[in-house]
Amino acid sequence: MANQWNSGINDRKLKEEICEIGRRVYNKGFAAANDGNISIRVGENEVLCSPTMICKGFMTPDDICAVDMEGTQIAGKRKRTSEVLLHLAIMKNRPDVKAVVHCHPPHATAFAVAREPIPQCILPEIEVFMGEVPIAPYETPGGHAFANTVVPFLQNGTNTIILTNHGTVTFGKSLEDAYWKTEILDAYCRILLLSKQLGRVTYLDERESVELLDLKKKLGFDDPRFHVENCDLCSNSAFRDGYKENKLEPKAFEPPPVYPGYLERQKAASAAPAKPAAAAEPDMETLVRLITEQVVAAMSK
């Protein structure tokens, strides 16, 4: 059986890619000083990750560490990041995830500190490329309890999670894929905050929201609303089982309008009785012939 990973802990190209993502995170202001951490899975039981206590904007390939899937360091001159268990919890629960980026983008982290849900059904790019962004409960960073806060929110196609009073974690099939989600999220949160300063945000209507989800499905992107029954189209309800009694309610933004969920709409459409087929309209030549026959028949009487 061929090795699906085609790499390993000595893959210098991937180490350079971690450093490049670190520079982007630092230069965008998503991680001050030693903040943030980055990882990529390179084997069945091997993960490359950034080290602790280093500025992500100035890492070199020789700084990169390796751990096994339990967090034990297996290579590297520096000590591995203290938050690697968060990355591993995501990879264990989502085999499709190969890369994770955790940092503190300021606009998105403002929502984490305010404990304000990220509104949906506002910006087309967010609906297509992101969808609902759940907010995991707070735990002291670093341990298993902290890592486990994200586990209830990892199913049904999510790719971005807010960490309460902390920051964000984004993940995907590659380092660049994971990083782009961070950048998209922070840009969206900045737009939301600026719109609020102008007075309000305007939600898309039901037809517009459904069309974007149809487009998302056509493009092959997943979304929690494609999986969860009785999930309102815009009201951040796809992860209600993960929240249990701790679901956050919007305070800074007006609640979205209530629309039937995506699956609910599909079920209703399939259950509706089929409309009778419309009778085919005759073409012009046939119409002229029928009228002529009627006229001739009337004149011959």
Image (cartoon, rainbow, N blue to C red):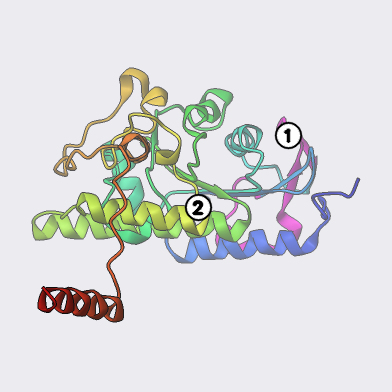
Residue 4: x and y in percent read 81, 49
Q: Is residue 65 left or right of residue 85?
A: right
As for residue 56 lying within the magenta part, the answer is yes
Q: Which residue is mark 2?
A: 221
Q: Quadrant of residue 175?
A: bottom right
Question: Does residue 122 appear in this view?
Answer: no
Residue 216 falls in image quadrant: bottom left
Evaluate whether residue 229 shows in this view.
Answer: yes
Which sits in the foreground, 76 or 14? 14
Residue found at the very far front of the displayed protein: 301
Residue at (75%, 33%) from the top-left corner?
A: 72
Q: Which residue is mark 1?
A: 69
Task: Calculate the distance from the C-alpha at mark 1 to the C-alpha at mark 2.
Answer: 27 Å
Q: Earlier in the sequence, mark 1 or mark 2?
A: 1
Q: Residue furthest top?
A: 245
Q: Residue at x 50, y 52 (%)?
A: 221
